[in-house]
Amino acid sequence: MGFSFDFSSLINLAYIIASILFIYGLKMLGRAETARRGNLVSATGMLLAVVVTLLSGGLSFTWILVGLVVGSAVGVVAARSVQMTAMPEMVALFNGSGGLASLLVGWAEYLREPDVPIATALPIVLAVLIGGIAFTGSVVAFGKLAGRLPGRPMLFRGQQPINAGILAAAAILGLIFILAPASNYSLFLIVIFASLVLGVLAVIPIGGADMPIVISLLNSYSGLAASAAGFILENNVLIVAGSLVGASGLILTQIMCKSMNRSLSNVLFSGFGASVTSGASAVEGEVKALSSEDAYFILEASRSVIFVPGYGMAVAQAQHVVRELADLLEENGAEVRYAIHPVAGRMPGHMNVLLAEANVPYEQLVEPEDVNPSMATIDVAVVIGANDVVNPAAREDQTSPLYGMPIINVDEARTVFVLKRSMNPGFSGVENPLFFKENTRMLFGDAKQTISSLVSEFKEALAA
């Protein structure tokens, strides 16, 4: 008996290989030292999936080539021109683009064949509904992150019932559409409109401090929409890829919520940050400023230093000079580490990305639970633009909005340097009593310039 192997079997085999590469690459992303290789492995799997799909036949390459050229041009320009400080906004747009693509796939497939069976009509509605929410929600997140929309929660009376009503109406209309898709195009358009409106209304009441969680959740939405699009197109690799993105996004969202000691419902519906100081105890004490020259003498005598980066480091683009200062401290005999809080910055892993750009050794990056037990032995903790993730009110003040949130206990170090432009609170707007602690010294000014001054002091001392 002969062995037959048709082209469709070859395509499915390639899809299986691509799916394995996705899963293996995703697993490699779980460790900092293998993350880059994991990214390449996953990208190879996607390249294989795209090439096999294009070779499967029945496609017009004219518009595919146009999209390929335009998309590649935009991607290259964005990758080369977007600053690391704007990376969260770019990630938000990526999520939105994925959601919009799934919405358009569902819409186009319905227009191509309106009289589709229920098995196809259902994923069309899901792709449109979830994709629309992901698209406009990501656009709003982009606006908040870029400062083009207010970072504070935007609330109005009856907001939650209105959102619930829109979602319920979209679900009911979608169900009616599924039962008779060919004769209910108007209902389909209403579902599209409702999804776009719901995406806006779902994100505007979420404050800037919760943007890392929102980005994770919207990333999950875009993956679920892509998976629904895979069912529409009967494309197995798209189903797998979308499911991986959706599941990993949900897991990451849960991790971020745990890092803030808050539930997802609290993040989505509480309007955290709308009244930022309500109920919090008044912060009292005297701020003690320090010059770079005096800070140098303290650092020069230190044998253990921990850097705690925050969004201020990203704004100042200070990651490279921070690495340079760390190298000089190590040459001087100090042990140097970087404490990274999971929600520091404006997107998951924001600080890790910045420090990786500066080639900071992976083994020097530690999480709060790894460093907090030994914080009292640290000579100097250098806080660079971080606010909420080092706020001791989360541990000490039961009236604080941050109470219960796990933080990096830098206030327990022997000396704390806080690098800030001013005394303004963090993105959540909560006052930080760390600034008034006896062991805290404030270094006001641009973080990059301040660190550069410290680097110059060390170099001059070494040259003498």
Image (spheres, grey):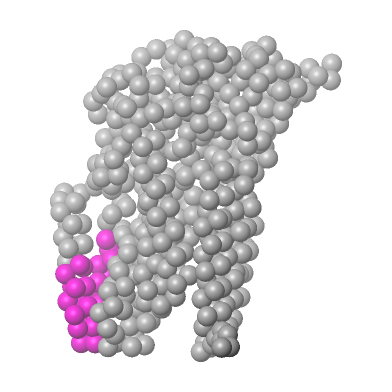
Left or right? Give the position of 164 relative to 286: left
Query: Which residue ends up furthest to the right in the rendered image?
Result: 464
Looking at the picture, tell me which residue is in the foreground, 321 or 257.
257
Q: Position of residue 393 (x, y in %)?
A: 35, 22
Residue at left 37%, top 51%?
A: 250
- Indicate the position of residue 264 as horizontal and vertical percent values: 30, 44
Q: Magenta span has 221?
A: no
Asked if one can make out residue 109 in the rendered structure from this viewpoint, the answer is yes
Range of residues picked out in magenta: 170-198
Q: Residue furthest front?
A: 1
Which of the 4 quarters of the picture holds residue 50?
Answer: bottom right
- Number of callouts: 0
Taking the spot 29% from the left edge, 85% from the top edge, the residue there is 116
On the rendered structure, is 183 left or right of 264?
A: left
The answer to which image quadrant residue 330 occupies is top right
| Residue at (59, 55) in percent of width and height | 39
Residue at x-position 27% and y-position 70%: 193
The answer to whether one can see residue 46 in this image is no
Assign the C terminus to one quadrant of the image: top right
Towards the viewer: 138 or 264: 264
Q: Please determine whether, in this image, residue 300 is positioned above or below residue 11.
A: above
Magenta segment main secondary structure: helix
